[in-house]
Amino acid sequence: MSTRKIAIMTMFVAIAVAGSAFVSFPAGIARAYPIQHAVNVLAAIMLGPIPALTIAFVTGLVRLLTGTGSLLAFPGGMIGAYLAGVMYKRFGKTAFAGIGEVIGTGFIAPLFAVPYAKILMGTTVTTFFFVPPFLVSSFSGAALGLLLASRLQHTQIGRKLGTLE
């Protein structure tokens, strides 16, 4: 992994952490943090599935350690980021990165969140408890990420970043 790629990954983590402090809104029983999902989509497109997953993990860890996030950031962010990268790599279209983010975070992550929340957080809720807020957060963030990706593709720096994988 190149120094340039690591530096860009670090910038994505910083954007996601700072963005979560400033941009959130209520989504049912939880808060939606769309910047994390937008970063997931951009990282999946520009860097690939493993770097996107790594960025989501480090972002979740920093947010947890600074008290600005919860343990649910791990399954919610990491699964969506990885699936966004896999879908983009498989189909080569930015829309599939957004679809992967929404499916991964909105539908698959709640399946992992239930036992995870029971063991680590002491809650006893069902999958359907997590689906609505995870869906709202991932959909709004994926839409923002796709909008940013489409705008970046028209810039010189965006074209350079797209060749990092």
Image (cartoon, grey):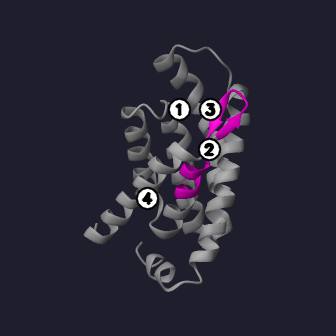
| CB under 8 Å between discs 2 and 1 | no
Q: Which residues are magenta?
A: 25-40
Whole-percent x, y for residue 123 in the image: 57, 15
Question: Which of the marked residues, 4 or 3, is nearer the chain's N terminus?
Answer: 4
Under circle 3, the secondary element is helix
Q: Is residue 2 visible in the rendered structure shown here?
A: no
Classify mark 4: residues with Cα within 10 Å, few (<14), some (14-19) or many (20+).
Answer: many
In the rendered image, which quarter contains the N terminus?
bottom left
Question: Which of the marked residues, 3 or 2, is nearer the chain's N terminus?
Answer: 2
**3 or 2: mark nearer the eye:** 2
In the rendered image, which quarter contains the C terminus?
bottom left
Under circle 2, the secondary element is helix
Mark 2 lies on residue: 105
| Disc sitting over residue 85 in the figure | none
Question: What amino acid type should be assigned to the residue bearing mark 4?
Answer: Phe
| Disc sitting over residue 111 in the figure | 3
Q: Residue at x 52, y 57 (%)?
A: 39
Whole-percent x, y for residue 160 in the image: 44, 82
Mark 4 lies on residue: 12
Q: Between 9 and 26, which is closer to the camera in this rendering? A: 26
Whole-percent x, y for residue 16 in the image: 48, 51
How much space separates mark 2 and mark 1, taking CA atoms?
Answer: 11 Å
Q: Between 151 and 122, which is closer to the camera in this rendering? A: 151
Question: Which of the marked residues, 4 or 2, is nearer the chain's N terminus?
Answer: 4
Question: What amino acid type should be assigned to the residue bearing mark 1?
Answer: Leu
Q: Residue at x 54, y 83 (%)?
A: 155
| Residue at far front of view | 22
How much space separates mark 3 and mark 2, taking CA atoms?
Answer: 10 Å
How much space separates mark 1 and mark 4, taking CA atoms?
Answer: 19 Å
Question: Which of the marked residues, 1 or 4, is nearer the chain's N terminus?
Answer: 4
Mark 1 lies on residue: 72
